[in-house]
């Protein structure tokens, strides 16, 4: 998701807020009139976790568009970089269209925006959906209640026409919030999830699947180019890959399971010494997370090696020392992805520099690192649902 500097900091901390804890569906008897809500979708069967063979690509004959020609079947949609902390893009919902600014998120699978009936006073600055103004809106008589690490939301479901630039999803299910907490100053109205259907908390078919099913895109592929510091130039593209946004070749990595955008990572090293992921671990590609996140002890060790000093919830380094800091290498599928210090340090609103790595408050049974925007600004990323793989290449 995306947010402002105050809650931009909380945004990263709140990434625990992610979509991992659904508290359950609750009947809505208290607040509003017949407004619909949601059910949990049964998780589909997943693939075996066995490692894919080395000749993975040869065994998957799949034609991925690699083109930047104007006539290609690719839709490129602009995103706005807000202080290197969050990337937002505009979509419309309804007939006539109502415009919203949303975060494009690879960890969640749901689309939601605030309803005009939302009772949270802090949403006054956000755009809210007027369902009675849309001739194509349909109610779904179910409610949902979702809890994040620091915040919660409840609402109802509807269906309507959703547009992402030139792409149109007809009769798309989405959530409408009636009450939200801890979303006060986030610089976006809602979230558009791009993960697998089994990650949906609302049930129904996610928008990316609908775009494919309805023939709006020719290939089940989307990709992100996240600009460095510049407000403009960031894009999300659907239906193929524009090779003008990266250099070299795309390195393909099979997913651990066809459920989330999670891959096996070999190790994390600095100055050729392994500092984390000693026996292999998992890496989650998360466009909705501002920072890189990992287990507390390993993150603390990394920050100590860098020489960062804690101040509040962040660890700072002298801005004059940034050019002397070592790169951090993330080795994925046998290929090193170096992250220079200029990439993993961020300058805050007061001009001080902090390290874009923090503890992940979520507890997992396996060592898991979330590679958020700090990593994805450096590496153009492709998400290939047709072959359940991620492509990475040096961003231009």
Image (cartoon, grey):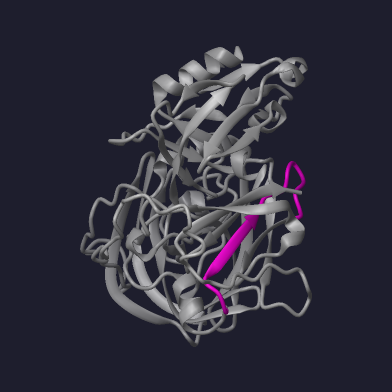
Residue 78 x/y as whole percent: 70, 62
Q: Is 223 above or below relative to 271?
A: below
- 157, 344: nearer the viewer: 344
- Identify the residue at image location x=47%, y=69%: 386
Front residue (pair 352, 244): 244
* Residue at the image position 23 percent from the left and 55 percent from the top: 24
Q: How many marks?
A: 0
The magenta span reads: 218-233
Q: Give the left or right position of residue 372, taking residue 227 as reference.
A: left
Magenta-highlighted stretch: main secondary structure?
loop
Q: At which x and y percent is residue 181?
A: 40, 46
Asked if the magenta segment contains residue 219, the reply would be: yes
Question: Does the rendering let one see residue 348?
Answer: no
Q: Is residue 322 magenta?
A: no
Whole-percent x, y for residue 282 in the image: 41, 40
Q: Is residue 280 visible?
A: yes
Note whether 33 is above or below 114 in the view shown.
Answer: below
At horizontal 29% and vertical 56% (from top left) the residue drawn is: 48
Please state if 40 lies on the left or on the right of 70 as rendered. Answer: left
Q: Position of residue 352 (x, y in %)?
A: 70, 21
Image vertical order of residue 63 relative to residue 18, above or below? below
């Amino acid at each position: 998701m995306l947010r402002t500097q105050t809650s931009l900091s909380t945004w990263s901390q709140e990434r625990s807020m992610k979509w991992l804890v659904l508290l359950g569906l609750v009947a809505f008897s208290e607040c509003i009139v017949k407004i619909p809500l949601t059910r949990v979708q049964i998780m589909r069967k997943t693939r075996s976790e066995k490692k894919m063979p080395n000749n993975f690509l040869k065994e998957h004959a799949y034609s991925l568009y690699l083109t930047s020609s104007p006539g290609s079947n690719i839709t490129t949609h602009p995103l706005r970089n807000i202080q290197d902390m969050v990337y937002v893009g505009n979509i419309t919902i309804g007939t006539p269209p109502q415009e919203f600014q949303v975060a494009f998120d690879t960890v969640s699978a749901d689309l939601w925006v605030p309803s005009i009936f939302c009772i949270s006073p802090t949403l006054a600055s956000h755009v809210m959906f007027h369902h009675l103004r849309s001739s194509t809106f349909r109610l779904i008589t179910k409610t949902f209640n979702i809890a994040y690490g620091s915040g919660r939301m409840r609402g109802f479901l509807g269906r309507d026409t959703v547009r992402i630039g030139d792409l149109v999803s007809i009769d798309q299910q989405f959530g409408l919030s009636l009450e939200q907490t801890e979303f006060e100053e986030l610089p976006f109205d809602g979230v558009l999830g791009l993960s697998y259907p089994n990650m949906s908390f609302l049930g129904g078919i996610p928008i990316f699947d609908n775009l494919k099913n309805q023939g709006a895109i020719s290939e089940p592929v989307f990709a992100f180019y996240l600009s460095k510091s510049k407000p403009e130039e960031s894009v999300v593209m659907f239906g193929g890959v524009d090779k003008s946004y990266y250099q070299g070749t795309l390195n393909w990595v099979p997913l651990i399971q066809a459920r989330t955008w999670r891959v096996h990572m070999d190790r994390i090293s600095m100055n050729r010494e392994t500092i984390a992921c000693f026996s292999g671990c998992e890496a989650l590609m998360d466009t909705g997370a501002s920072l890189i996140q990992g287990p507390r002890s390993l993150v603390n060790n990394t920050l100590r090696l860098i020489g960062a000093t804690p101040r509040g919830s962040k660890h700072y380094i002298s801005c004059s020392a940034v050019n002397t800091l070592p790169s951090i290498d993330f080795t994925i599928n046998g290929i090193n992805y170096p992250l220079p210090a200029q990439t993993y340090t961020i300058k805050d609103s007061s001009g001080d520099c902090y390290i874009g790595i923090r503890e992940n408050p979520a507890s997992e049974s396996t060592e898991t690192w979330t590679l958020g925007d700090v990593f994805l600004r450096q590496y153009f990323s492709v998400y290939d649902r047709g072959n359940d793989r991620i492509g990475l290449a040096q961003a231009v």
